[in-house]
C-alpha cells in the first residue's frame, strides 16, 4: 500500500474546530463526546469514557470495580509498570501471576494459584497486540467472583475467537500514548457494557460531580451558577481528556483500520523474512486469535548469543533499534526498595517482592526482542526485515 500518513487532514481539521471555539465552556467537551460515541460504536461497546492517559484509566477502572485498601489485584509482571501503578494508586496490593512461555501472556493457571480471599480483580494485558486466554481467565473470575479488567493499550482491533478485544472483560482500558496504534500524544479510553460501572467511571474521573453521567462529561453552566448547587457526591479525580486531545484521537479513530493494518503488514514482512529460522522464536499466535502487532516480538532461543550482540549486529547490517522487554515490574528499583510513597503500609504484613515469583517471566524477559511495526512506508519495513534475516544468517 506504499506510504500512509500518521497524522492526516481530519486530525488537523478537528483540532482547528476546537481552537475556533476558543475553549468556551459553552462548547467544551463536544469533541470528547463525539470521540466517546464513535469509539463505543467502533469497539462494540455500550459506553466509552475518555480519560487523560492510559495509566489513569486503570486506576479509575479499579476504583469503579470497588478495589481498595486490603484488596489484592492479580497482574502480569511482564508489561509496562503502569499496569501495576494503577493497582498501587487504588491503594491495593499487586500480586504477580506468571506468563505463558510461548505467547508471553499472563497464564490462567498461574492466576488460579495466586487467588486468595483478598483477591478482588484481575488485570489481563493483551501484550504486544495479542490477547491472553480470556475464556480461561473469565472462568476463573466467575468461579471466584472477581472483576476482569482488560489492559488493551497495545491491542487495537485485535480479536479473540471472533470477538473484539475490549469486549471480553468487565472494563477495558486503551491508551493513546504516542507509540500506540492510534495516538493523541497522551490520552486513553475506558469501555464497558455496564451502565453502573460507566456511571462510576464518569463520576470518579470527573471530581465526583453530581451533574455528570454515562453520556455527559461536564457539569452545566446553569448548575454551577446556582449558589445552592451541591457539586460533589463522591471523591473523584480530575482525569478528563481535553477536547484538543480528543480532536486528534477522533481523527485517528477514523483511519484506525489503516493504522492497524499497517502494523500487521509489517509483522507479516518480518515473519516471512525469518520463517523457520530456529534462532528467533516469534510470539505464538493461534489461529483463533488476531494479533494487532503493536510490536513484532520474538524470543532469542540460543543462550550462547547475547541480546546486545544480536542487536548490535542487526544495527550494523541496516536494522532499526530493537526494543527490549521491560524489566519485570517487581524487579524495578521502586519495587526492590518498596518505594511506594507510604502505600507499603497498606500492603499488609509479610508482603515482599523477590526474584523467583514468576520463573517463566524471569527466564524469557532478558531474551525478548521487540521489532518495530509502525513503518509508514512498507519498503522500509522490507529493508529492515532483510537486515534481520542477514543477522540471523550471521549467527547461524
Image: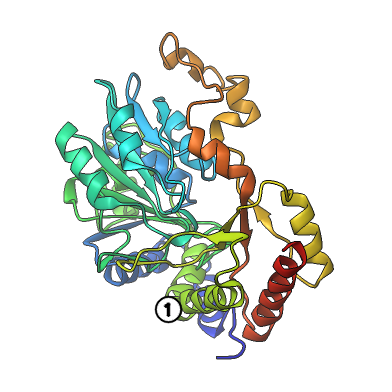
Q: Position of residue 204 (x, y in %)?
A: 34, 40
- Residue 222 visible, this orientation: yes
Q: Which quadrant holds the C terminus?
A: bottom right
Q: Which quadrant holds the N terminus?
A: bottom right
Residue extending farthest bottom: 1
Nearest the viewer among 24 and 237 is: 237
- Residue 63 visible, this orientation: no
Q: Position of residue 171 (x, y in %)?
A: 29, 49
Q: Which residue is mark 1?
A: 257
**Which quarter of the picture shows residue 50?**
bottom left
Residue extending farthest top: 349
Q: Position of residue 252 (x, y in %)?
A: 48, 74
Nearest the viewer among 331 and 229 is: 331
Nearest the viewer among 6 and 374 is: 374
Name the residue at 21% across, 39% down. 140
297 vs 164, left or right, is right
Which colour scheme appears in the figure? rainbow
Would you call the spot at circle 1 few (<14 residues within 10 Å), some (14-19), or many (20 or more)? Answer: some
Q: Secondary structure at mark 1?
A: helix
- From what the image shows, is residue 375 above or below residue 293? below
Amino acid at each position: 500500500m506504499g506510504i500512509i500518513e500518521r497524522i492526516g487532514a481530519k486530525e488537523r481539521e478537528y483540532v482547528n474546530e476546537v481552537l475556533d471555539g476558543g475553549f468556551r465552556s459553552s462548547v467544551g467537551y463536544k469533541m470528547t463526546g463525539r470521540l466517546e460515541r464513535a469509539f463505543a460504536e467502533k469497539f462494540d461497546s455500550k459506553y466509552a469514557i475518555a480519560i487523560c492517559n492510559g495509566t489513569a484509566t486503570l486506576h479509575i477502572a479499579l476504583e469503579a470495580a470497588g478495589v481498595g485498601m486490603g484488596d489484592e489485584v492479580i497482574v502480569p509482571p511482564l508489561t509496562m509498570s503502569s499496569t501495576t501503578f494503577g493497582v498501587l494508586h487504588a491503594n491495593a496490593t499487586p500480586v504477580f501471576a506468571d506468563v505463558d512461555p510461548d505467547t508471553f501472556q499472563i497464564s490462567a493457571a498461574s492466576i488460579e494459584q495466586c487467588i486468595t480471599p483478598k483477591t478482588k480483580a484481575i488485570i489481563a494485558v493483551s501484550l504486544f497486540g495479542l490477547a491472553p486466554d480470556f475464556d480461561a481467565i473469565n472462568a476463573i473470575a466467575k468461579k471466584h467472583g472477581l472483576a476482569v479488567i482488560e489492559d488493551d493499550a497495545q491491542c487495537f482491533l485485535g480479536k479473540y475467537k471472533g470477538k473484539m478485544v475490549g469486549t471480553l472483560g468487565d472494563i477495558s482500558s486503551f491508551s493513546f500514548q504516542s507509540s500506540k496504534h492510534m495516538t493523541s500524544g497522551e490520552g486513553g479510553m475506558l469501555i464497558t457494557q455496564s451502565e453502573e460501572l460507566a456511571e462510576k467511571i464518569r463520576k470518579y474521573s470527573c471530581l465526583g460531580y453530581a451533574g455528570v453521567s454515562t453520556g455527559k462529561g461536564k457539569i452545566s453552566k446553569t448548575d454551577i451558577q446556582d449558589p445552592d448547587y451541591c457539586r460533589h457526591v463522591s471523591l473523584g479525580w480530575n482525569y478528563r481528556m481535553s477536547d484538543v486531545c480528543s480532536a486528534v484521537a477522533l481523527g485517528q479513530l477514523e483511519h484506525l483500520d489503516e493504522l492497524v493494518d499497517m502494523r500487521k503488514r509489517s509483522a507479516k514482512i518480518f515473519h516471512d523474512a525469518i520463517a523457520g529460522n530456529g534462532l528467533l522464536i516469534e510470539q505464538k499466535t493461534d489461529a483463533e486469535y488476531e494479533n494487532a502487532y503493536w510490536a513484532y516480538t520474538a524470543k532469542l532461543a540460543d543462550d550462547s548469543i547475547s541480546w546486545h550482540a544480536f542487536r548490535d549486529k542487526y544495527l550494523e547490517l541496516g536494522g532499526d533499534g530493537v526494543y527490549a522487554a521491560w524489566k519485570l515490574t517487581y524487579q524495578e528499583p521502586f519495587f526492590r526498595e518498596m518505594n511506594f510513597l507510604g502505600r507499603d503500609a497498606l500492603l499488609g504484613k509479610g508482603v515482599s517482592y523477590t526474584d523467583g515469583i514468576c520463573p517463566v517471566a524471569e527466564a524469557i524477559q532478558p531474551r525478548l526482542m521487540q521489532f518495530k511495526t509502525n513503518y509508514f512506508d512498507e519498503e522500509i519495513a522490507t529493508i529492515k526485515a532483510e537486515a534481520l534475516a542477514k543477522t540471523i544468517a550471521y549467527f547461524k
